[in-house]
Amino acid sequence: MVKKNWMFVSVKQAKPVIIIVMLVSFLSLWMLLPTRFANPASAGYSLESPRLAAKSLYKLDIGWPKFPKYFTGQVFGVAVDPVADIVYVAQRGESVSKVLMFTEHGYFLKGWNTTTIELPHGIFATNSSPAPSVWVTDVGNGKYGHTVKQYTPSGTLLQTLGTPGTPGSDLYPLQFDQPAEVFISRKGEMYIVDGDGGLNNRLIKLAEDFTITWVQGEKGVKPSQFYIPHSVTEDTVGRVWVADRGNKRLQVFDAASGEWLGSWDSCFTDDAPYSVRLTSDNKYFVVAQLNINRVIFLSVPPIGDIGNCLKVDTIQLADDVKPHLVDVSRKTGAIYVAEIGARQAQRYVPNIRK
Ligand SMILES: *[C@@H]1O[C@H](CO)[C@@H](O)[C@H](O)[C@H]1NC(C)=O
């Protein structure tokens, strides 16, 4: 009975099996053919291909924000909350809101003021529990300056790192001189680049409890020395990338030990890197070059091989736009660019290839 049943099933399945075998053989033969016709779509995705230049990776979202009239000052920084639908924009100037909040669709949420920010420089949004917050680096000389401060999304000061109003180089207690930017990893560890032309030229890593894990750098041109470390990010394989602005290079460090891993300078002969962030697909670094009004895309190198930088795409902005710092939405893939010269933030979205 059992045997008969098996025979019956086997005969019934024979037809589809033969069809599958034929299909597989045909496909394997076709793959081996040297002259199979080119697939334009797959050619477009091959980033090493020079033909790619024809189509940019990102395009301007002209609909963001819906009402640009909210920009009233010099836009220095942008930050995208990794979870909540909030894009923060930090402004400088007389009689302007220090921070503006938009949605990723471009709707204005609110702006806020605080007397505790003198001159905002870098801004970073985090959503680690229990609530979202935003960090601002303050390069001002007033009584709240030379600090890195955490705010609620609506502008209530939560905590301050550094010694307000006092530039310095001490680590215990921690002091900064014009801290340029902060970046917080998914593990909640913080990287601070200190600073934007003051006493210090260093990269500081803090643990989640804000104790110092390691410090790298001093002023200079040698490996792991800096001149105006301006922006910092961590990639997905434990490497920390610093835009070493004054030395016109990106330097790379091991996230765990702080050990120097390498440096890229060949992409920055025209202008220094001002910012560094990863695209949401983790394939490229987004780097702003303020003086030549460009945003460039560099291939993220494989593990264990920093090599040389490879530029795969460029967004050329208009004269005097002056892109300063950028941030990337992990949710939508959009890139936000803070433009000091144009006094606005702009949004670029992945260009879907056909
Ligand atoms: C912040 O203060 C400036 C004046 O210094 C004012 O023009 C602006 O409307 C204020 N913004 C908010 C959201 O209160």
Image (spheres, rainbow, N blue to C red):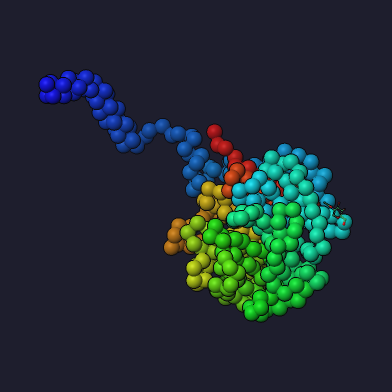
Q: Is residue 315 something that shows in the picture?
A: no
Quadrant of the rendered image containing residue 277: bottom right
Residue at 41% x, 32% y: name it.
Answer: 37
Eyeballing the image, is 346 above or below 8? below
Q: Is residue 162 something that shows in the picture?
A: yes
Quadrant of the image containing the C terminus = top right
Who is closer to the viewer here, 317 or 143?
143
Relative to 234, 336 lies left or right: right
Relative to 10, 143 lies left or right: right
* Image spot of residue 235 (x, y percent): 53, 58
* Image spot of residue 191 (x, y percent): 60, 66
Residue at 26% x, 23% y: name it.
Answer: 16
The extreme front residue here reads 130
Quadrant of the rendered image containing residue 250: bottom right
Who is closer to the viewer here, 281 or 155?
155
Residue at 54% x, 57% y: name it.
Answer: 186
* Image spot of residue 153 (x, y percent): 71, 53
Eyeballing the image, is 252 above or below 98? below
Who is closer to the viewer here, 297 or 152?
152
Q: Give the total number of marks visible in the rendering.
A: 0
Quadrant of the image containing the N terminus = top left
Residue at 48% x, 39% y: name it.
Answer: 43
* Image spot of residue 259 (x, y percent): 50, 72
